[in-house]
Amino acid sequence: MKFVNTKRLSPVIYEGDLPHKYDLFHRPFKQVPESEKELTKYCQKYGVVNDDAWWDIQKDRCINGYTAKDILRNGGECFVDGRDVIRRANGDRYLPDLDLTISGDDLHISGRQYFYLNFWKIKRLDKKTGRKKVLPPAFTDLSFENWSLRERRLKLMKHMTWFKRRQVGLTEESACDVAYDFLFFDDSYIHTCIHQNLIRRFFFFHNNHIFHNLYV
């Protein structure tokens, strides 16, 4: 099984699925005041409107997930047909390691992964310049597997431990996962345990930077 047309899973980034042009979404975040009083003045000054209908749709997708058409094909090296992907008699694809069934060639991603692809930013390689920049994340086979495992963990109400190498994006995903709980669940308590002092300083600096770059 392989993925094609994956930009369809990031409609906010690649398909022009954006709010009204005067929505606060489009304003430079560093200019937006934090206090309610100053924010009211700011919105009046720039004629800011709230595109509530668009935000309601985005919230629903972030909670219930999103389905994009015509994403799956046979073949591929990450999810090997016949080993990692079992085709059932009705044509469904079953991924036993994820306990996940996919019908047809459309792909449904979790709300967490939709949030990650459309509202999160990570530091990754810019293919045009060959340098790392803060950009929206790309959909990858590994990322799909990781987010699907997180959903399985939640359904089973289990804990999860990751063993990983560096430079595969898992730290970025984990930071997003923390932010998701912070934003979508009231009274969330986030505990992060990091051993090395340098890594700890980097983690909190990085997450503070990312929170300030969030669209929502």
Image (cartoon, rainbow, N blue to C red):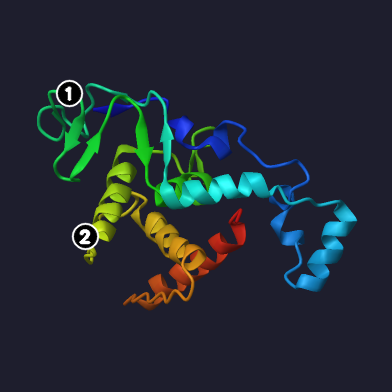
Inspect the image, locate mark 1, and give the three-letter code of the amino acid beneath it.
Asn
Drawn side of residue 52 relative to residue 114, left or right? right
Please identify the quarter of the rendering in which residue 144 is found. top left
Is the residue marked by circle 2 packed among few (<14), some (14-19), or many (20+) residues within 10 Å?
A: few
Inspect the image, locate mark 2, and give the three-letter code of the amino acid beneath it.
Leu
Residue 14 in percent (x, y) is at 56, 33
Q: Look at 38% across and 23% down and name the residue there.
A: 70
Reply above or below: 16 against 212.
above
Please identify the quarter of the rendering in which residue 78 is found. top left
Residue 153 in percent (x, y) is at 24, 58
Disc 2 secondary structure class = helix
- In the foreground, 95 or 117: 95
The answer, for residue 121, to whether it is visible in the render is: no
Reply above or below: 187 against 4.
below
Q: Which residue is mark 1?
A: 90
Are the residues tagged 1 and 2 within 8 Å (C-beta)? no
